[in-house]
Amino acid sequence: MTLALAIETSCDDTAAAVVDSQLHVHSSVIESSIDQHRAFGGVVPELAGRAHLTTIGPVVRRALENADLDPHRPAIDVVAVTSGPGLIGSLLIGLSAAKAYALAWEVPFVGVNHLEGHLFAPLLERPDLRWPLVTLLVSGGHSMIVLQHGPGRHEVLGETIDDAAGEAYDKVARWLGLAYPGGPEIDRLAAQGTPGALKLPVSMTGDNFDFSFSGLKTAVVRATEKNPDVALADVAASFQAAVAEQLLRKLRRTLETHSDVEGVALAGGVAANSALRRGVEALASDFGVVSLLPSLAMCTDNAAMIAAAGIYRFEHDGPSDLTLSACPNWALADVL
Ligand code: KG4
Ligand code: ZN
């Protein structure tokens, strides 16, 4: 059995986890620097990098101790680390730390694609799942529909042509004067509003699997300028309904055109969204397939998912070379 220590520092969360090749999570530690970014309405790359540098050592130590391992000489077989995509300064801190631990403990290390990590998250909680699987991966930086033929065997069917779904949530929240990150704020407010109160367009109704959210964001700005007295909760509910409808429409189309699919999964930070979770459950039941909704902790960035993807890559492709660099724009389609 392979035991991995994984490190994730692609954005503002410093995370470390210990996971074995049967996908049992021995420990998972996350330290967020979000409080430092809130005043700026978004993640400030330099602040994130500096925070990783001070936090990475204690976070790794806690992950090892929580897994009952000796922090000086842990019985780890491989160190896995996110090497892209993400903020370059943040990635470099995690990658340098991972190389240092691998050298000190004389074990191999493996670079992991952050998006592939998100795709492995549902597996950590549902080892019984069957393939093929369609996954809606929606986060602050990405929105895509991925057909998974097996672990590590994925095909990107469609993706956003402009903003990511989480990015649209954050931008609309900022326009409405809500705190960053805006997704949870809008989700909470939407529960008290009426979805049809504001007439908003549902974008990308064509016969493909791509998304678009920037027009919707502009429509919210225009509509609220025209109706300054509209209740905040109604704006939130109307925006949330339009986002969910677009995402669910494309998921429905995927299930209609891929009849062999066994399950539909959500991944990424926006997978925490209540309307999306309800919609995916209803869709799965309509098509008689399993719905895989990761726990909230497994939706957002964490190192357990990086460990799961890292163990797969290590066992199938071998270790990475110590000369590996960070790839801030590493596309999922370019993963081996
Ligand atoms: O995956 P993630 O933690 O970080 C990356 O972008 O990789 O996703 C963060 C995004 C943010 O844009 C945040 O606003 C959004 O996920 N988010 C939500 C909810 N919770 C987090 N969006 C909608 N509804 C939510 N409940
Ligand atoms: Zn992420």
Image: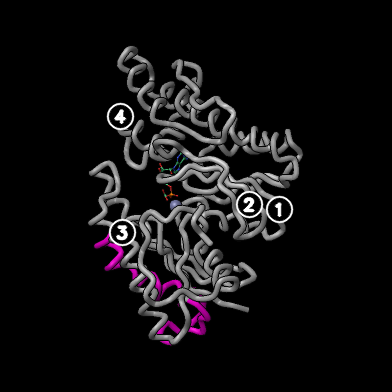
Q: Nearer the viewer, mark 3 or mark 4?
A: 3
**What residue is drawn where x is 67% and y is 34%?**
282
Q: CA distance from mark 2 to mark 1?
A: 7 Å
Q: Amino acid at mark 3?
A: Ile
| Residue that appears at 47% across and 72% down | 110
Q: Earlier in the sequence, mark 3 or mark 1?
A: 3
Majority SS type along the magenta span: helix
Left or right? Give the position of 159 relative to 214.
right
Distance of mark 3 from mark 1, alpha carbons? Answer: 34 Å
Going by the image, does 318 lie left or right of 180? right
Determine whether label 2 and label 1 are within 8 Å by CB: yes
Label located before the other in sequence (4 or 2): 2
How far from the left and from the top, in percent, is residue 145?
Answer: 56, 43
Q: Quadrant of ligand 1?
A: top left
Q: Which residue is mark 2?
A: 148
**From the viewer's perspective, is 68 left or right of 148?**
left
> What is the number of the mark on residue 131?
1
Circle 1 sits in a helix, a strand or a loop, which is it?
loop
Residue at 49% across, 63% down: 306
Disc 3: which residue: 88
Q: Amino acid at mark 4?
A: Trp
- In the image, residue 249 above or below residue 121: above
Q: Quadrant of residue 328?
A: bottom left
Q: Specify start and end residues of the magenta stretch as a single range.
A: 49-78
Q: Circle 4 is placed at which residue position?
A: 175
Badge 2 amino acid: Gln
Say if 320 sits above or below 172 in the image.
below
Dots 4 and 2: beta carbons under 8 Å? no
Badge 3 or badge 4: first in the primary sequence: 3
Tell whether label 1 touches label 4 (CB within 8 Å): no
Asked whether disc 3 touches disc 1, contact meaning CB atoms under 8 Å apart, the reply is no
Query: Which residue type does callout 1 highlight?
Result: Trp
